[in-house]
Amino acid sequence: MPTHRPIPRPKVPKVGRPTGKFTQHRRLDVLREKLEVHAGGLSLEDLAQMLRISTRGVRRYLSELALITELESIEVRPGGAHLWRIKPSERGRAVLLRRTQAYALLAARRVFEPIRGSALFDEIDVALRQVQQVAHRPAARTGARGDVVAEIPLDGRFAYVPHAPRAYANRSEDVDRLFQAVVELAVLRFRYRDAGAEPRADAKDGREAREQRDQREQREQREQRDKGARITSHPYALVLHGGSIVCVAHDVDRDTARAFVFDRMTDFDVAPAERFDLPADFDIADWLHGDFGVGRAARSVKLLVEFEPRAAEGVRARRVHPSQKVGLAPDGRVRMSWTLPESPEILERFRCWVLGFGAAVHVVEPPELADDIAGELRRAAARYGAR
């Protein structure tokens, strides 16, 4: 007798608890969206069917959602099923946006590209999709003066383009752990590779001395450098700067606050049970230095730079740091001064910025920076065979 193959079952999403660490988080967003659309409320059975989970699972998600949104269970008729809904008072907290305001928020969405792939990005994306609905909703009447006309979309014609972002998609879980520690004021442990950690050969050492260096010690140092030092920290704040992520945190072992670059951070370990108090005098503005990065130091240094007329117009049009002061000479030259923290990272970014102007700039103060810039330009000229 011929054998009969069983009829294959259609491929449908499995019912039950989703796999992965952040799919549950995204399903919570779907639950909130469903309740916002159905203002009158939904039963447990309706929600279970929409989310393709059991009613027990729905209760668990409702408990999680209740931590951030006020919910209520109402009885439609005596003895009947209860309906779950977002409280009307909670709906009254919605932010009203005009179409122009919605497009302005959408124009800045590329700011968050460095954290794409993380649960934090997905949370922001949910909000921006709701903002997009506001921008595209049909107008019941003529818009207010100065508002965008509903029939003329502005999505692809009004945008902000930030610095080329870093690609952190393969480190999305690390991004979420870091954000979790900042939000919950939880102790964070990680390894950190300092930019200046690479060992340099002493100029006084001869070639023989360097070759005789113990190979095993070299290998151990290299491995330790690659891993980075183990840091126990109190993460204060998270900054998206120049397309990359920076964490301002207190280094517990060194008893000092530092700016840690995410690219050099590995092996994250968040300790939710270990909490710390944010210092009352902490202000993230003290750490932000415009184009020159994130950092802070006990001492500051004054920098004075002169630009030739051909570069003056461009530099005058930009305020690269809050302390910037400008002076204009009759012949078109421009002198600019800044007061920056004496932080190696900040001063290095300033040095690179100045070098970008080539021969159109002259560092006046401090003299050691002027000498360093002059030496760098001489080395650059030598590479092109200049005399």
Image (cartoon, rainbow, N blue to C red):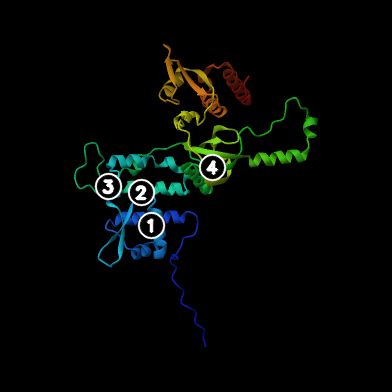
> Which image quarter: residue 267?
top right
User: Label 4 neighbourhood size at 10 Å, few (<14), some (14-19), many (20+)?
Assistant: many
Which of the two labelled residues, at mark 4 and mark 3, occupies the earlier sequence position?
3
Residue kind at label 1, given as amino acid type: Leu
Q: Nearer the viewer, residue 174 or 368?
A: 174
| Secondary structure beneath label 2 | helix
- For label 2, the crowd category at 10 Å Cα-Cα, with few meaning under 14, some 14 to 19 and many 20 or more, is few
Labels 4 and 1 touching (C-beta < 8 A): no
Q: In what element is the residue under mark 1? A: helix
Give the distance between the C-alpha atoms of the residues marked 4 and 1, in whole angstroms. 29 Å
Disc 4 residue type (three-letter): Val
Indicate which disc, 2 or 3, sits on the residue closer to the N terminus: 3
* Residue underneath mark 4: 187
Residue 92's mark? Answer: 3
Mark 4 vs 2, N-terminal side: 2
Find residue 29 and report its horizontal and vertical position in percent.
Answer: 39, 53
Question: Residue 129's mark?
Answer: 2
Residue bearing mark 1: 62
Furthest residue to the bottom?
Answer: 1
Question: Which label's residue is closer to the chain start, 3 or 1?
Answer: 1
> Of the residues tagged 4 and 3, which is closer to the observer?
4
Give the image location of residue 4, x and y in percent: 49, 82
Query: Which of the marked residues, 4 or 1, is nearer the chain's N terminus?
Result: 1
Q: Check if mark 4's residue and mark 2's residue have beta carbons within 8 Å.
A: no
